[in-house]
Amino acid sequence: MVYRTAIAAPAVSLRREIDRLFDDTLSALGATGTTRVNDWMPPVDIRESESELTLTLEIPGVAPQNIQLTTDNGVLTVSGEKNEERKEDEQRRYHLVERSYGSFSRSFRMPKNLDESKIDATFEHGVLTIHIPKAAIPQPRKIEVRSGSTQGAVAEGENASR
């Protein structure tokens, strides 16, 4: 889990931008070394409260039916596809294209104290919000220690009633 402080915020932001630059550059090169424009990674915010973990992903332009959420062995994966709408002809041509299109996938290892069976997701205005409630934390309890003679008396009483 990443926690920000006033001192670390600029360094974390710079690190994230450098990571994104490398990810964009490496994913833009296909196996043949040619440039691809699909594959992109939506930004995410992860926050924790006393009762849940919340992930918020920005995925504008993606239809809700094109989003898949799966869990497997404590890993939550969000994937989907943003279809390209660009059409050029002799009367229309693009001079600059900065929006990303194509498939995406993000995976997150979840802490063990979450209840995967109660994950809830909503999608509104291009923002996917995933709520993962925390599981009930086992509470300490006192276990009574019985003596051997008490246990024998219970067993004799059970035999007598049979």
Image (tube, rainbow, N blue to C red):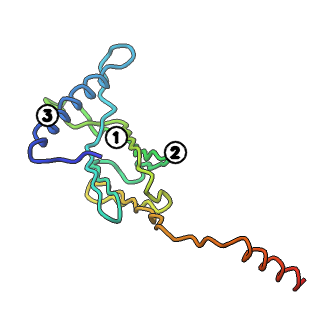
Q: Which residue is drawn at 31% across and 64% down?
A: 50
Query: SS of the residue at dot 2?
Result: loop
Q: Mark 3 points at which residue?
A: 14
Q: Is residue 118 above or below residue 66?
A: below
Query: Could you tell me residue 142's position as x and y percent?
Result: 52, 71
- Residue 114: which quarter of the image? bottom left
Look at label 2 and name its amino acid: Asn
Q: Where is residue 145 in the image (x, y as percent from the top left)?
A: 61, 70
Which residue is farthest top?
32
Tell me if residue 57 comes above or below residue 158 in the rendering. above
Residue 28, given in percent of the width and then of the height, sits at 29, 24
* Towards the viewer: 113 or 143: 143
Nearer to us of marks 1 and 3 is 3
| C-alpha span from label 2 to label 3 | 32 Å
Which residue position holds label 1?
A: 83
Image mark for residue 73 = 2
Label 2 or label 3, whichever comes before in sequence order = 3
